[in-house]
Image (spheres, rainbow, N blue to C red):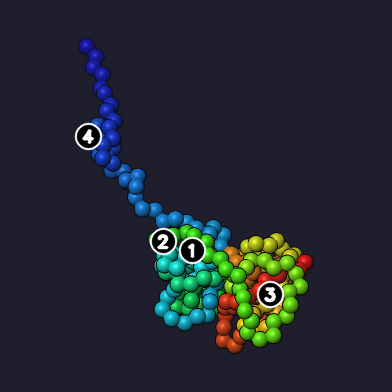
Amino acid sequence: MSSKKKLVLSVAAGALVTGGFVATMAPSNAAIPDVVCPGSTVTLSGEAGPPAASSGTFPVGTKLKVTNLDNGQATTVTVNGPSGSCVLLNNAAFDKVREPGKNLIRRALIERVEGGGDALAGAAGGAGGQVPPATGERVCPGSTVTLSGEAGPPAASSGTFPVGTKLKVTNLDNGQATTVTVNGPSGSCVLLNNAAFDKVREPGKNLIRRARIERVG
């Protein structure tokens, strides 16, 4: 008389039972970080203070984890103000994830670990000096402009406009302006390389908080 063995599978309270063996399963409601701003670069604001970030995507108080995929270093920071990037790190925060001599992280993983996701926006206004008149279509209102740390002739990268687009960037705090051509992608409306940033920067600053950006070609 033949006998047949029965295989009994049952799932209860996150456990898979198979013939006397129990394999635990991760609860379906486990907290998983929210990966945000895919493809964004991460840059250095040049600002002092304890580790922190500014963002053009998330409100003040949001906690973001930034991982440099080129060296595996990560840091978790709280957004403390607006910027023109998904996440812009101050000096102390950037030092935790940077590669020596670099002010730009091209391969970054950005995760929201706590806080909201409402966009921040606002138009740059006012003037600190003689500001030249607008000559093109104003774009990316409220964006800050940062320094990529890359060498070469004056140029910009952009996450908004394609290669070949000409953008005029005006620093409203000193009235200096420069017109550059987009030569690659970034996580900002406009990210200036060293030579371009030097044309509009204020001494010692790697961030322009009050910028006017125009598309001129």
Residue to which mark 2 is pinned: 115
Task: Please state which amino acid type lies under the numbered disc 2.
Answer: Gly
Mark 4 or mark 2, earlier in chain: 4
Residue to which mark 1 is pinned: 58
Q: Residue at x 43, y 81 (%)?
A: 49
Residue 30 position within the rendered picture, expressed as x and y whole percent measured from the top left: 34, 50
User: From mark 1 to mark 3, how far is it between C-alphas?
Assistant: 24 Å
Q: Secondary structure at mark 1?
A: loop
The label number, if any, that marks residue 169 in the structure image = 3
Q: Secondary structure at mark 2?
A: loop
Residue 11 position within the rendered picture, expressed as x and y whole percent measured from the top left: 28, 35
Task: Please state which amino acid type lies under the numbered disc 3.
Answer: Val
Residue 19 position within the rendered picture, expressed as x and y whole percent measured from the top left: 24, 32
Report whether 144 appears left or right of 93: right
User: From mark 4 to mark 3, how far is it between C-alphas?
Assistant: 69 Å
Mark 2 or mark 3, earlier in chain: 2
Residue to which mark 4 is pinned: 20
Q: In which quadrant of the rendered view does residue 196 lie?
A: bottom right
Q: Residue at x 60, y 66 (%)?
A: 188
